[in-house]
Amino acid sequence: MTDEELLVEFTLARLDHPELDLDEVAALVVRRAGPDRMVEFAAENLSTRDELRGAVFPAAVEHVLRVVLTLRGPAD
C-alpha cells in the first residue's frame, strides 16, 4: 500500500468517525487493513526507527500516524 493510498484510507475512516482522535483512527485503519498489512506497517515503522523488535499493533499504528502527519505537511 502506498503512502497516498494509506492517507486515503485514513481520511475515509476519519470521515466515518469524526469523534475519534487521530491515534484511534490510525488503530481503526490498522484493524481494517488485516494481519498481513499490520505486519507490513509494523516492519516499516521498526525499520524507520532502526529497531529489530517491537509489538506489532502499536508499531503499525505509529507507522500510519507517521505517514499521515508527514503527508499533511507542516501545521500553519
Image (cartoon, grey):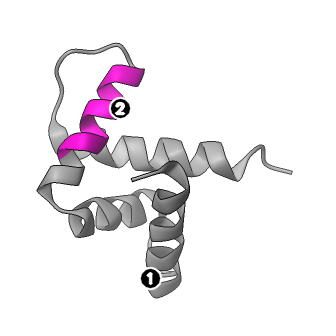
**Is 42 colored magenta in this rendering?**
yes
Q: Quadrant of residue 24?
A: bottom left
Q: Position of residue 3 (x, y in %)?
A: 51, 50
Look at the numbered disc 2 and give the secondary structure of its residue. Answer: helix
Q: Which mark is residue 17?
A: 1
Q: Residue furthest right?
A: 76
Looking at the picture, how far across and down is residue 50, in whole percent? Answer: 35, 13
- Mark 1 vs mark 2: give the one in front: 2
- The residue carrying mark 2 is 45
Q: Give the residue displayed 30% in from the left and 43% down from the top.
A: 41
Q: Is residue 4 above or below residue 54?
A: below
The local crowd at label 1, few if under 14, some if 14 to 19, many if 20 or more residues have their Cα within 10 Å, is few
- Quarter-of-image position of residue 35: bottom left
Q: Could you tell me residue 61's position as x and y percent?
A: 33, 48
Count of residue discs: 2
Q: Nearer the viewer, residue 4 or 69?
A: 4
Residue drawn at (41%, 66%), measured in percent from left and top?
25
Residue visible at 53% across and 83% down in the picture:
15
Q: Which residues are magenta?
A: 39-48
**Left or right placement of residue 71 versus residue 18 in this view:** right
Identify the amino acid type marked 2: Asn
